[in-house]
Amino acid sequence: MKTKVAILNEQSLDKNIILEAAEIIKRGGVVAFPTETVYGLGANALDEEAVKKIFIAKGRPQDNPLIIHVGDFNISPYVKEVPKVAKEIMNKFWPGPITLIFEKSDKVPMITSANLSTIGVRMPDNNIARELILAANTTIAAPSANISGRPSPTDVDSCIEDLSGKIDYILGGENSEVGLESTIVDCTVNPICILRPGAITLEMLKEIDENVYVDPAVLNKPTEDFKPKAPGMKYRHYAPKAPVKIVSGDIEKTIAKINEIVLNYIERGKRVGVIATDETKNSYNSDIVVSLGSRENLYEIGQNLFKVLRSFDTMDVDIILCEAFNEQGVGAAIMNRLKKSAGFDIIEA
Ligand code: TXA
Ligand code: MG
């Protein structure tokens, strides 16, 4: 399949390109598009055949449900009811990096929700995404636009790398500002529950519902027979080709521990990559050190995380060692993604 790529400027949108991409969605095709969290792989969420193509292009397991994306606040055609707490979250954080789970209406086919009776809904904070959804005159189902298991794409080049030749169209825009997928909140339960941490943090949601809590599945390594509420949480994820190990603890001890492991590998003729920060990048004895940004700015770390994980695939390393971060605020989302990319391989410094 030939994949058309068109790059747009979010500030001065070329309407003809949006209409061309929307036409593909209307005809049951698949379009990758930018959002503020990560790039999405979109198709008409109400068209079974179109949704099937998303699963095939990504190589996504059939039991992993998709999120639907809306261009305005009118979600009533897709959900049974909108609880009061969900309305408050929508008013405060939409458009933005937060997905809410509702009981779904019959209009949303079972393939989209992977046979669940619920559906995740999000209004992205990105002009290209919203204009595309509105022009397609539907709701767009979109997982992250990566091959299943790989780090999510935060720029157009990563989408092209994973999906060129597999889908109809790639709409490019700026790099994703947040860089981590949306927070997912189950609004079908009381109190509401965070199924995936993101840029809208537990602390921020507590201002709306003080009883909100994080699903234990987010924090622990999944076991064989484990059935998390967000099915995607059980799969290996965000993984570069080389294995990742996280080294956790006081920063001075972390540096010493990473250097000890680096030496050990180098002595055995292995190539070691280190994921560091601006404050620590000159402290390592490996010559393959990449900084995620400043420890003072966790938003910058989140923005760069997936791109940095992907970058090791072209550096031919045998192992990747990564510093850990404080799990407060957006740090919870960063550590959730890192732990999954490391298959929960964490070494105490
Ligand atoms: O930021 C995002 O959410 C991005 C952009 C493109 O919007 N999308 C995204 O989709 O991350 P995806 O498919 O890569 O991740 C969706 C996650 C999966 O872990 C899935 O299992 C979970 O959401 N999920 C979807 N529907 C659900 C439901 N009804 N109940 C529980 N979990 C659900
Ligand atoms: Mg994904």
Image (spheres, rainbow, N blue to C red):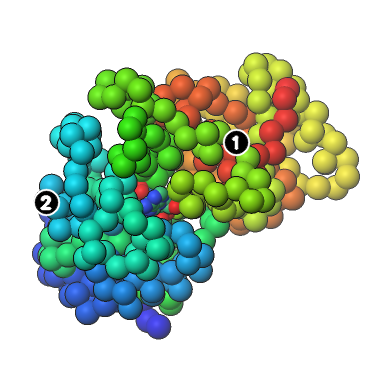
Q: Which residue is drawn at the image coordinates 41% and 28% (left, top)?
A: 213
Q: Is residue 267 left or right of residue 196?
A: right
| Residue reaching furthest to the right | 268
Count numbered badges in the picture: 2
Judge by depth and name the residue closer to the eye, 127 or 225: 225
Image quadrant in which you'd find residue 223: top right
Q: Which labelled disc corresponds to residue 74?
A: 2
Q: Which residue is drawn at the image coordinates 55% and 49% (left, top)?
A: 227
In this figure, which residue is indicated by the disc labeled 1? 220
Residue 317 x %, y %: 70, 50
| Residue reaching furthest to the bottom | 1
Q: Which labelled disc corresponds to residue 39?
A: none
Image quadrant in which you'd find residue 256: top right
Residue 345 x %, y %: 69, 38
Q: Is residue 124 left or right of residue 167?
A: left
Judge by depth and name the residue closer to the eye, 249 or 205: 205
